[in-house]
Image (spheres, rainbow, N blue to C red):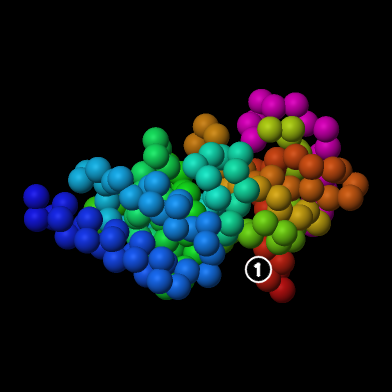
Amino acid sequence: MRRIGSFSLGILLITGLWAAGAPSQGLRPALARSAAITHAAPRQLVVFKRFGAALRVTPSSSASIRHTLPCGSMMQVVGVQGGWFHVIANGSRVHGWIGGARVADAANPPAFDCTDSYTFQVGDHAYTYVKTGCLSLRVSPSRIAVYHSCVRNFHDYTVTNGPIAVAGEDWFGVTSTSTGGGWALAQYLLPYHMNG
């Protein structure tokens, strides 16, 4: 019971700070609604996926992305809804909802390695690279989804969504003037700074 009490006090302090001087008036109701956390919820989470995790404005994979956190990022839990956590990223006031499949309890995470990890923010440019052939642009994030384009290496895409995991693989939503929008496998997309 003592752990629950101290955790509840932490939630009250967080919501109190926002009530006192939050830059966004819309944040206080969201925090208040999400403050009903069960005693089993972790206090702090860590992103353990190579391509990071999207912080969304609502607990839905179709919601807009506020920020994409890289592998190893830590965050404080302020709410839980279904398989989603309402979090505040450590060292900032950036808050949002993150899918439970891309994060773990920071006190007891699985073995993971962020070496050579990277991610993309919405609006970032990414270039394509595959060892052979071309990279398919799928209409949905799945290898069995229909594709309408297959682009050569170093095709310039703009990132629009993701990362989203399907069947153990990560995908990013992307678009370009020549292909339109779709989904590409994350492992075949690279940030420009890695090539320069």
Q: Is residue 99 above or below residue 117?
A: above
Decide if residue 133 is in sight here: no
Magenta highlight on residue 11: no
Q: Is residue 164 above or below residue 21?
A: above
Q: Nearer the viewer, residue 62 or 178?
A: 62
Magenta highlight on residue 147: yes
Residue at image x 71%, y 66%?
192
Q: Residue flagged by tag 1: what amino acid is it?
A: Met
Figure quadrant of the C terminus: bottom right
Q: Is residue 16 left or right of residue 30?
A: left
Q: Is residue 109 left or right of residue 128?
A: left
Decide if residue 181 is in sight here: yes
Please give the residue where the numbered disc 1 appears in the rendered image: 194
Q: Main secondary structure of the magenta part?
A: loop
- The stretch in magenta equals 141-155
Q: Mark 1, residues whose alpha carbon is within 10 Å: few (<14), some, or many (≥20)? A: few
How far across and down, in percent of the image, does residue 54 sit? 54, 52
How far across and down, in percent of the image, does residue 21 sit? 45, 73
Q: Nearer the viewer, residue 15 or 116?
A: 15
Residue at image x 53%, y 39%?
60
Residue at image x 30%, y 45%?
36
What secondary structure is found at the residue carrying circle 1?
helix
Residue at image x 44%, y 58%?
28
How far across and down, in percent of the image, does residue 39 sit? 20, 45
How far across and down, in percent of the image, does residue 139 sit? 74, 32
Q: Is residue 86 above or below residue 139?
A: below
Q: Is residue 50 left or right of residue 195?
A: left
Q: Nearer the viewer, residue 113 or 65?
A: 65
